[in-house]
Image (spheres, helix red, strand yellow):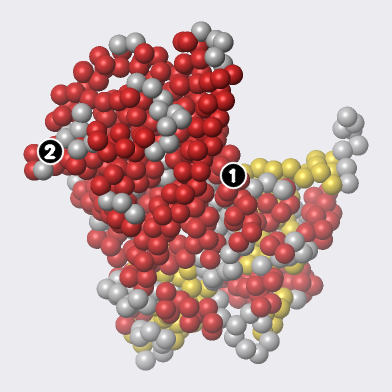
Amino acid sequence: MEKSLDTLCLGQKGIVTGINTHQTLCKRMAEFGLVPGTQVCCRYRTPGGSVTALEFRGTVLALRTRDMKHIKVRC
Amino acid sequence: MESSGEQKITVALAGNPNVGKSTLFNTLTGLHQHTGNWPGKTVGVAQGQLRRQNIEYTFIDLPGTYSLKGSSADEQIAGEYIRADRADCTVVVCDGSCLERSLILALQILQCCKCVVVCVNLMDEANRHGLSVNAKRLSRCLDAPVVLTAAGQRTGLETLLQAIQKTAGQEQKLRTPTASDPIEEAERIARACVSRDGQDGWNFQRKIDRLLVSRRFGVPFLFLILLGIVWLTVWGANYPSMLLERGADALYALLTNALSGLPWWLSGVLVDGIYATCARVICVMLPPMAIFFPLFTILEDIGYLPRMAFLLDPAMARCGGCGKQALTLCMGLGCNAVGVMGCRIIRSPRERLSAILTNAMVPCNGRFPALILLGGLFFPDAGTALVVALCVALGVVGAMAITAFLNKTVLRGQDSTFIMELPPFRRPRLGQILVRSLLDRSLFVALRALYVAAPAGMLLWIFTNTSALDKLAALLDPAGLLLGMNGIILLAFVFSLPANELLIPVILMAITRTSLQGTSGLGQQLLQNWFTWKMAVCTMVFTLFHWPCATTLMTVYRETHSIKNTAAAFALPTAVGVVICALLNLLL
């Protein structure tokens, strides 16, 4: 099933299929190794839900949930 | 000294943030660059030497970066240095526990630097998590020498030096990429060279994290930790301060006796002016610092600060900032100049500027003693800690409010993003923390007392013993009264521009006309009688919100290269303080 990354529940895993956002953010995510094909796991979320921590490639990265709307994952 | 037979090698240490570059640098050079477990700890370039077997190595500790074309100030410094390929040898420091991610940068560096040694660091941590790295295979894949190290444990360093020496002499070819995408290539190489032995060692880490950043306990826990640190600082500083004061009094008596032969004005300047001011600064400054810094360093070492940024990002985002600003504010609790420099980790220039301008609103360690003393006048014991904690909270709220104001008016612009790595928890190196933060800090305080307090003490004594002080105080009196204080306090604030620590010593000397040395505890009593409730509150508020110290202002200028911004850093907190104090004066 394909859905956007921000709708992933805590603990749920998925494989990134596409990132559709402005270029700077795309580039920045690629620097961390977040590109299509990456397997990600949703780890923690702040109380309001506005920041989410993802685990991929052996590291944990915190991102704004808003910015994750444009990332599609298959789970 | 014979230098003809000596070889000189410049070695740049590059790599992702938080892979232990600074720890490696420190163990190699014996220097004491501050380290911490969070990405962005090193924002400037440090240099150190090591002499070994007729070779002089110069190590350059670059700020960590995720790519060679990073956009934040610290990443640009690193990226430019690496791309210019200026060093004789570039050591790419990788994280053994997440080799794949480190290799992305390593592959980029291999494509633009001629002499590269790949150092896979943190192998102790990787082994603990059941990971092992095949160095030979990795070396073949990367076409570069690979050394496995654990800088914290000092293992593998000799091999690293040998590899550097061997590589630096040879002219190597740049590596041509075998795949179009470094990320894919990194993934492939990591899969070939890293073996996992059964169990996943990260589970325990995840459990702690789930608690520390949990929705329910995360934020309350954060405030408990900060309150705890403030409380320990305030409560713990009491007794050592008293002891130090007693020692200073004894020395004062000795000095007065020894110098009794000198003319009164000379012994006055030396003992009542210079010595007394220095002694008071050290007495009130040293204990809080000696407690606060080790505690804060423990938090840093464990890796709690990035979690803090994570938890506070929503609040900061509402003000138009980002979670990293929360980190710089925390660093400001230690020293505002350090906090301002730390703003380099903020990528958006707009957010960085608003963070720089508001940093001085959180009280730094130099202002803690004044807050503690003033708070203690009306709320003894546990109340003092609570008042100080309230002051810190007020400072943070003020900084956030002004950030919001700036971001909604002058610095309006696009919302930026917040991306931050949450590194694994690491055990703090307690011994090292204690020794380093105590030694470095006490030295710093002592030197600062000499540089700043000594001339100020001299000037103050001269002012006090001529009519200059009265005239100046009278001049400032109307303004001071308008702000709920008086001329003397305002003058003390002006006097403490070089260093905030001077505030209370200046007030004391101005109201008593002597140094008050040799009269333990009398200062507190005198202040208690002199300060009214309103004056104390206004002074505390103005301590939070007034012009930053000269060091901080200089740092702002260095970071922004703009007189206008430096003036804004001066005027903004002052304006806030003036408005609040004037309001308080009317209301109370």
**Marks 2, 1: nearer the viewer:** 2
Identify which residue is drawn at 59% across, 55% down.
Answer: B434
Judging depth in this view, the residue of B419 and A69 nearest the camera is B419
What is the x, y in percent for residue B16?
57, 60
The residue positioned 30% from the left and 34% from the top of the image is B526
Q: At 40% across and 28% down in the image, what residue appears?
A: B516
Please, is residue B561 above or below residue B416 in the view?
above
Circle 2 sits on which residue?
Answer: B585
Q: Residue B233 placed where, x, y %?
A: 43, 53
Amino acid type, residue under disc 2 in the picture? Asn
Task: Compute the Cα span from label 2 to label 1.
Answer: 41 Å
Judged left or right of residue B52, residue B479 is left
What's the residue at 31%, 13% (across, down)?
Answer: B468
Label 1 marks a residue whose chain is: B
The residue that mark 1 highlights is B440
Q: Secondary structure at mark 2?
A: helix
Between discs 2 and 1, the one toward the N terminus: 1
